[in-house]
Image (cartoon, rainbow, N blue to C red):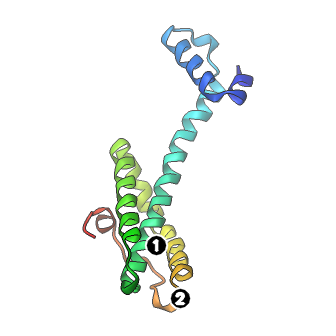
Amino acid sequence: MSCLHDKDLLLWSEEQSALLRNGEYDLLDIENIIEELDAVGKSDQHALYSYLVVLITHLLKKEYQPGMLSKSWIRSISNSRGGIAKILKRNPSYTRFLHDDIDDAYKMARKNAILETGLKPEVFPKVNFYDIDFLLTEAD
């Protein structure tokens, strides 16, 4: 069974679902089921972090280089907020990752904003000043 898991994940998952529905528990590929369940959470957590970095990057650019504001920045801010909201709607407990990751996401976003704007690093605060409520509010 584990061989199929490595060759065709969709077919493997369909077979595992069928085994569960039929009560054939002794045929389940438990080791890989556990691996896949663990991976589900990590994938959404990574997506949440990525949305957070993109959101903060564009908010920094908007705040510190307002003369360059573009529709793509506004769209990126909106899309990032929408992506975060969608993940949190499906998985409300992921809110804890926002709190855990916000400072690291800010550091990455600050680096991105410095590179993308060409502004000096000292223009951007070194410490995150955005709170979660502001980041999730569709106000811009």
Q: Nearer the viewer, residue 56 or 118?
A: 118
- Left or right of 72? Residue 5 is right
Residue at 37%, 66% in the rendered image: 77
Image coordinates of residue 5 in percent, x first then y, are: 68, 27
Label 2–label 1 contact, CB within 8 A:
no
Secondary structure at badge 2 equals helix
Q: Residue at x 63, y 12 (%)?
A: 27
Q: Measuring 50% from the left and 59% from the top, which residue is drawn there? A: 50
Which residue has dot 1 on it?
57
Q: Which x, y percent locates residue 45?
A: 49, 51
The residue type indicated by label 2 comes to: Pro
In the image, residue 43 lies at what x, y percent? 54, 46
Quadrant of image for the N terminus = top right
Q: Which mark is residue 129?
A: none
Residue placed farthest to the left in the image? 139
- Name the quadrant of the C terminus: bottom left
Q: Nearer the viewer, residue 57 or 21?
A: 57
Q: Is 119 situated left or right of 55 in this image? A: right
Mark 2 crowdedness (10 Å alpha carbons): few <14, some 14-19, many ≥20: few
Against 71, residue 12 (above or below) is above
Q: Which mark is residue 121?
A: 2
Packing grade of label 1 (10 A; few <14, some 14-19, many >=20) is many
Q: Is residue 61 above or below residue 82?
A: below
In the image, taking residue 63 as reference, residue 1 lies left or right, namely right
| Distance between mark 2 and mark 1 Cα atoms | 13 Å
Q: What residue is rendered at 56% in x and 20% in y?
A: 14
Q: Position of residue 19 (x, y in %)?
A: 56, 12
Secondary structure at badge 1 equals: helix
Q: Quadrant of residue 73?
A: bottom left
Q: Tag 1: residue type?
A: Thr
Disc on the earlier residue, 2 or 1: 1
